[in-house]
Amino acid sequence: MTDRNRAARFAVLWALQYDRRPHDLPLLRFLLRQQTTYYREAVVSGMAPDLTLAGFLVAEHRQVQDLWLHWDAKNISFDTAVGYHLYHLLTAGIPASTEAVETSCHPDRDRILRDITSTHHTDAAVEEWLDRQRTRFPADPADEGLKEWAHHAARFGEREASRLFMTEWAAGEPRTDSTLDTLQFHLAHLGYLAEAVDVQKEAVALKDSWSGAKGSKLLALARLQRRTDDFAGAWQTLQEVQSVLPPDKNGCEQGKWRHFVKECFLLVPIAPDTSTAQRLLAASEQDLQGIPRLWMDGVLDAAIAAAEHIGDPQALHRYGALQQIAAGERAQEVDRATRPSASGPATS
């Protein structure tokens, strides 16, 4: 599903952030409802500042009847349940909010009461949260940082402006893992993949030992190189990744083994010739052996796509059989995880 009005809606929210007036509350309520609908119908996972900003601007008016709007926004998904703060419901004051819920016939009445009447919640804590939100969403545009402007520009489709804001922000920050990760991710998201590769190479160079952390950085670099169709660069990077992976594929690094082999399979379609692609497929299948939980991380989907690209029916048959086995193993793991213990019924 595509929301053609999302950018326009955010533009209005952004303007209202910088021009807050009491009579804007009906418009803010409408925008929060629209954001809630968008997240419920079109967002599979995650939560962006557009929903948080809409919720904060409504919450700042401190109207007790708006707690139901906030409850709807909080209960869209697992991510909003975690990320949309309960204090949105309490800005009218905990006593007033509690009374409104107690006298309601809402189907979630008891659940809401249990959440908002915790002794951890106080009006002072709600005020501190509101102050933090005001810092996060300042009323004066001059108080916004370069990184925030970069994100704003990206939401409006202004790729070059967003790139310039983010690179200028990064130029003023220490060249740490955090700075480089933020810059690389943003450049890649905007489609500036060659620049993202350069930043990721810098991030790899920060890791001066062949550690698990360096392996993760190298994997990210290989993904970016593949996306730029740089077969030679990606393959060289993947060989470096393999040299730092532990020999025990069943240990705590099994996830990195799956991601490594997945990248190898994904590289097959951009191999320069059929012979190279076939050799890479064979090497990837060899590395696949012994890795547990193949139903995770999409590794077998990548294997099947690689075999289809080459047109290898025998490989397709093998990977299809592995996929069926992996599906059975997944079902068994889920069953074990959800089965009540033998000592008695499971408790929440």
Image (cartoon, rainbow, N blue to C red):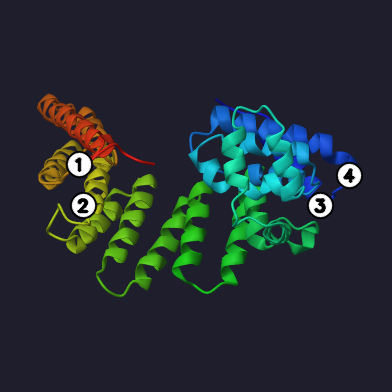
Quadrant of residue 253 within the rendered picture: bottom left
User: N-terminal of the two: label 4 or label 1?
Assistant: 4
Residue type pointed to by label 3: Tyr
Query: Crowdedness of circle 3 by 10 Å Cα count: few (<14), some, many (20+)?
Result: few
Query: Crowdedness of circle 4 by 10 Å Cα count: few (<14), some, many (20+)?
Result: few
User: N-terminal of the two: label 2 or label 3?
Assistant: 3
The residue that label 1 is drawn on is 293
Task: State the separation of the CA atoms marked 2 and 1.
Answer: 9 Å
Q: Is residue 141 left or right of residue 45?
A: right
Residue 334: x and y in percent read: 26, 35
Which mark is in front, 3 or 1?
A: 1
The residue that label 2 is drawn on is 254
> Is residue 223 at least partly visible in the picture?
yes
Residues at marks 2 and 1 touching, judged by CB atoms closer than 8 Å: yes
Residue type pointed to by label 4: Pro
The residue that label 3 is drawn on is 18
Where disc 1 sits, the SS reads: loop
Above or below 145: residue 18: above
Task: State the separation of the CA atoms marked 2 and 3.
Answer: 48 Å
User: N-terminal of the two: label 3 or label 1?
Assistant: 3
Residue 79: x and y in percent read: 51, 42
Residue 236: x and y in percent read: 24, 57
Residues at marks 4 and 2 touching, judged by CB atoms closer than 8 Å: no
Which mark is in front, 4 or 2?
A: 4
Q: Which is more toward the observer, 278 or 126?
A: 126
**Which image quarter holds the C terminus?**
top left
Residue type pointed to by label 1: Arg
